[in-house]
Amino acid sequence: MLTLEADVRQQMVELNRKVAESAKAGWRSGNAEDSALLRRRGTRAARGLTRFTLSRISDARAAWQGALEVMEEGVRGEEAREVVQIARDLIDSWLALAQKARELWHDVAAITGATPEGLDDLDVGEAEVRKVKSAADKIYAFLTRARTPMDHALLEKGQEEIAQGQYRTAEQIQRGARQPNGEQG
């Protein structure tokens, strides 16, 4: 890990995953013949998961903002990939929580007839997190793209030309590009 912050974010990812995995467990346990009790348990479980999920939305935003800040400080290569991947993992774990909350409400509503709550807020949060995910995925794709192999012969030729003074300055190149009929200055 890069920092304490990265370690904390990784632990958040693990917590989100554990909560998502256990989301459906428990609310149907006990005496399933008491429909009022089942409805209360199901509603309480779904409401609790929805609240938990909505309370963690800022984690996804903060993880991405933190990754951007670390990269602005000059972190490169493997460290940059790691920090962006941690942010992506946190974003994905939040999206999984949101999906589990929806699934739980769907199950509770189907079994007990309870009315789902907070799904509009989940929709708004998910739209925002998906925008953050898109940005994180683009940066990660850039950081992990295949690199063109270096042409050592071309590099050596360029070094020789520079050593012999056979090069143009940036200003000369700019002037040359602006002249009509392709003439260079």
Image: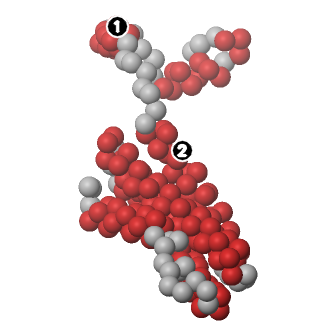
Of the 4 image quadrants, the one containing the C terminus is top right
Q: Secondary structure at mark 1?
A: helix
Note whether residue 58 is visible: no
Mark 1 vs mark 2, foreground winner is 2
- Residue 138's label in the rendered image is 2
Indicate the position of residue 50 as horizontal and vertical percent values. Answer: 58, 77
What kind of residue is marked 1?
A: Ala
Say whether residue 19 is visible: yes
Q: Amino acid at mark 2?
A: Lys
Label annotation for residue 153: 1
The mark tally for this picture is 2
The answer to whether the residues at label 1 and label 2 have Cβ atoms under 8 Å apart is: no
Where is residue 42, by image quadrant?
bottom right
Residue in the foreground of this view, choosing between 93 and 129 = 93
Q: How is the image coloured?
A: secondary structure
Left/right of residue 38 with respect to residue 69 in the rendered view: right
For mark 2, give the secondary structure: helix
**16 vs 178, nearest the viewer:** 16
Near mark 1 (Cα within 10 A), the count class, few <14, some 14-19 or many ≥20, is few
For the N terminus, which image quadrant?
Answer: bottom left
Foreground residue among 42 and 154? 42
x 64%, y 11%: residue:
183
- Cα–Cα span, label 1 and label 2: 33 Å
Q: Image height check: is 64 above or below 35?
A: above
Q: Residues within 10 Å of mark 2 (few under 14, many from 20)?
A: few
